[in-house]
Image (cartoon, rainbow, N blue to C red):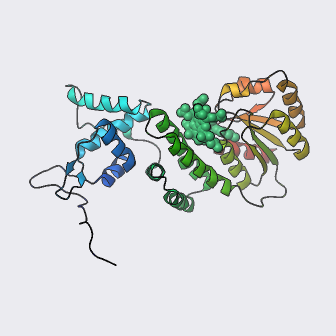
Amino acid sequence: MTTSGPPAPPPEDRGAGATAPRWRIGVLAARVGVSETLLRAWELRYGLLSPTRTDSGYRLYGPEDERRARAMQDARRRGVPAGEAAAGVLAAERSPTGAPGRHPAAYATSESLDARRTRSELEAAMVAYDATSMHAVLDRLLAQVSVEAAITEVLLPFLSGVGDGWAAGDFSVADEHFASDLVRSRLAALSVSSGSRSGPVALLACLPSETHDIGLKAFEVVLLRAGWRTRFLGPRTPLRSLEVAAEVIEPDLVVVTGTTASAFDLTAEDGPVVARLGRLARVALAGHGADAATAARWGAELLHGDPVAAARALVGSARAR
Ligand code: B12
């Protein structure tokens, strides 16, 4: 092993005679709670950060960069697109009421810093297409918290963040596909078990036009862990096939999911199929596209909340019967 190599950069440098601290990007990322990659993107694309350089070329960031990054993060949480948010942060500094140096209380969140940091780590690994690091982050997470907490606090918010980042132009379609496939594969692995032989049986399917099945997979994982049995049909299940499967399986519950309201629209041929399905089993609708009116049209129940909360409520109500 050789001992030569680039000199180690200073973790923090106050510079000769300067009072403001200077940090490397990793330290700034940790302070703000976003990934290094996102900070770099904000710097390169929008000129949001103004690092100085050490003699050996390392970028060092200061409190002003931290303030801008926090303001950017705050605006992004409010749904402001990235380019617009960066322009707003920089413009505010130039206006007399911009109040540089202020740290609004809106940055405080109720969520645990660890969950946020874990999601930032996943993001950083995602944009590098570093599957090994993503799995390592998830291994560590699952060793620390329950599967249910990992799903609600990290996996699902991470995917939402990826979707939001994609919509805002921070992440590419490739990033999103890579991340969602990896998360789905972890959930699928958690759903592999010989399972219970006697628990209630749930038949799980997405609507015929629906490809988003990760929420349903997460729901399956929680049901299995609570002793239920599941049969997962997944994306794009034709309603007639679902009916046939229900005839064979005789499930206690059929769950149908869709992301958009229109995915739940029923054609003239679908109506009788859904009616027969309702006579075969208890049917419940879930996902962004499902609401009370749709459930009423389907003669079905509506599952409320995220997949973990809904599965827990279901398990609780089944026990109470
Ligand atoms: C991963 C992903 C994909 C993956 C899906 C992979 C897979 N196997 O599921 C792929 C790449 C295939 C994909 C494709 C598309 N996608 Co997409 N995708 C996403 C993304 C990033 C994450 C979705 C996800 O799994 N989230 C996790 C779930 C659990 O969260 P959720 O969807 O917010 O669900 C909440 C509730 O509805 C509920 N819930 C959801 N499912 C279930 C199930 C049960 C049982 C229960 C109880 C509750 C529940 O829990 C959540 C609350 O915590 C979202 C972004 C986002 N903000 O969600 C976009 C998103 C859902 N996709 C979107 C779009 C537009 C598409 C495409 C049409 C894009 C295109 N032009 O091709 C296609 C085709 C989709 C189709 N025909 O069905 C839009 C949908 C907008 C809309 N309402 O119409 C989103 C919101 C992105 C965006 N910001 O615009 N996508």
Q: Position of residue 85 (x, y in %)?
A: 36, 31
- Residue found at the far top of this picture: 268
Q: Quadrant of residue 300?
A: top right
Q: Position of residue 303 (x, y in %)?
A: 71, 36
Q: Position of residue 298 (x, y in %)?
A: 79, 27
Taking the image in four quarters, ligand 1 sits in the one at: top right
- The answer to whether residue 212 is above or below residue 135 is above
- The answer to whether residue 310 is above or below residue 58 is above
Residue at horizontal 16 percent and vertical 57 percent from the top:
55
Left or right: residue 11 versus residue 137 is: left
- The answer to whether residue 220 is above or below residue 98 is below
- Residue found at the far bottom of this picture: 1
Q: Position of residue 209 (x, y in %)?
A: 71, 32
Residue at horizontal 36 percent and vertical 42 percent from the top:
41
The residue lying toward the viewer, choosing from 103 and 258, is 258
Left or right: residue 294 versus residue 183 is: right
Q: Quadrant of residue 208?
A: top right
Q: Quadrant of residue 143?
A: bottom right
The residue lying toward the viewer, choosing from 220 and 35, is 35
Residue at horizontal 82 percent and vertical 44 percent from the top:
321
